[in-house]
Image (spheres, grey):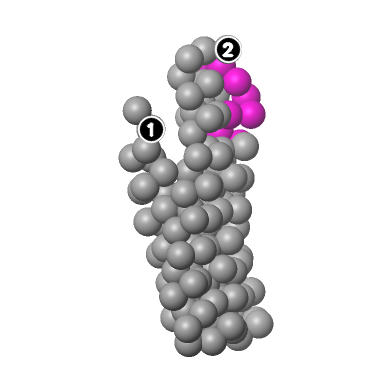
Amino acid sequence: MSTQLAQGRALVPRIAIAEVLSVSFAALGFAFVSAQYAGAVLVGGALVVIGTLLFGWRMFAAGVGSPGTALTSMLVGKALQWIALALGLFLVIGVWHWPVVPVVSGVIAAQVGFWIGTGLVH
């Protein structure tokens, strides 16, 4: 296995953990408002974490291959990530009517976790 592939595969769980920690911290802040708001933050953040894991799974599933295979894996992974987020937001906000601000705050907190997770890599 190539070094880059091993580093990429190791990076995905680190990013997901950083996202979970960031979302948990945001949910703790919303818990002072209500348990429902804290839950909404967790659900919004979970959508991003699921998307990150889907992207990582698809991105590195093919292993070492041609540049075309890598590009295809990346684009399919990114599409899965966006579909998971869009469908999740539609269901959570549009169908189940969770409060919008905490759900979106969870999404934003997970994005901050993504930035932190990628910054922890040497």
Query: Which of the two marks, 1 or 2, is nearer to us in this view?
Result: 1
Three-letter code for the amino acid on which mark 1 is drawn? Val
**SS of the residue under disc 2:** loop
Residue at 50% x, 71% y is 27
Identify the secondary structure beneath mark 1.
loop
Q: Residue at x 61, y 36 (%)?
A: 58
How many other residues sit within 10 Å of disc 1, few (<14), some (14-19) or many (≥20)?
few
Question: Between 31 and 50, which is closer to the camera in this rendering?
Answer: 31
Q: Is residue 67 magenta?
A: yes
Q: Is residue 50 left or right of residue 103?
A: right
Which residue is under mark 2?
Answer: 1
Task: Answer above or below: position of 72 versus 116.
Answer: above
Question: Mark 2 Cα within 10 Å, few/some/many (few <14, many 20+)?
Answer: few
Whole-percent x, y for residue 44 in the image = 54, 68
Residue beneath label 1, please? 121
Question: In this rendering, does residue 80 appear at all?
Answer: yes
Viewer-side residue, 85 vs 98: 98
| Quarter that holds the C terminus | top left
Which x, y percent locates residue 104? Answer: 45, 72
Q: Which mark is residue 93?
A: none
Boundaries of the magenta span = 58-68
Query: Residue shown at 53%/30% (left/top)?
Result: 10
- 52 up-or-down from 41: above or below: above
**How far is the residue under mark 1 from the one under mark 2?**
19 Å
Earlier-in-chain disc, 1 versus 2 = 2
Name the residue type under label 2: Met
